[in-house]
Image (cartoon, grey):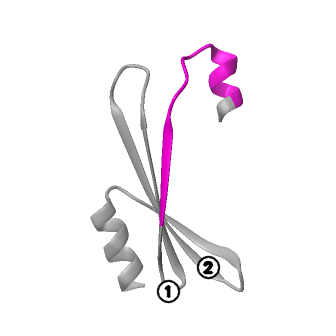
Amino acid sequence: MKFQIAKRGERRIEVQPEFTQLGNKIIASTQWLAPDGRRHEHFQVLTIHNDKIVDMQGCNSRREAERFAHRH
């Protein structure tokens, strides 16, 4: 991703990842400030089995990610 940003000549984007583990699930969130000044956030729920990612679900909000992680 950093290579593609540099290749296009866009200014540097500060990415802030965060991980929260709930049993065999990990909620991964990433937020960054786009060059136009807008803040973006993405959430994924990763399911781990035998030290490998076996499922990844994208979510629209932290609340949705937490509900998914607790439900499945």
Q: Residues within 10 Å of mark 2 (few under 14, many from 20)?
A: some
Badge 1 vs badge 2, beta-carbon distance below 8 Å: no
In the image, residue 28 sits, relative to residue 46, either above or below, namely above
- Residue under the point 62% across and 24% down: 5
Residue 13 colored magenta?
Answer: yes
Instruction: Tell me the residue at 65%/35% (across/down).
Output: 1
Tell me the amino acid under the disc marked 2: Ile
Query: From what the image shows, is residue 7 above or below residue 26?
Result: above
Q: Quadrant of residue 31?
A: top left
Q: Is residue 16 left or right of residue 41?
A: right
Residue 15 image label:
none
Q: Is residue 45 above or below residue 48?
A: above
Residue 36: where, in percent of width, then height?
37, 19
Indicate the secondary structure of the residue bearing disc 2: strand
Magenta residues span 3-19
Q: Position of residue 26 (x, y in %)?
A: 51, 72
Q: Which residue is mark 2?
A: 48
* Coordinates of residue 47 in the picture (x, y in percent): 56, 77
**Disc 1/disc 2 C-alpha distance (Å):** 9 Å
Image quadrant in which the C terminus is located? bottom left
Q: Earlier in the sequence, mark 1 or mark 2?
A: 1
Q: Is residue 15 left or right of residue 37?
A: right
Q: Residue at x 62, y 13 (%)?
A: 9
Asked whether residue 70 is drawn in magenta, I would say no
Q: Measuring from the top left, give residue 11's x and y in whole percent.
A: 54, 17
Front residue (pair 67, 30): 30
Q: Nearer the viewer, mark 1 or mark 2?
A: 1
Label 1's element? loop
Q: Which residue is mark 1?
A: 23
Residue lying at 67% horizontally and 27% vertically, measured from the top left: 4
Say what amino acid the circle numbered 1 marks: Gly
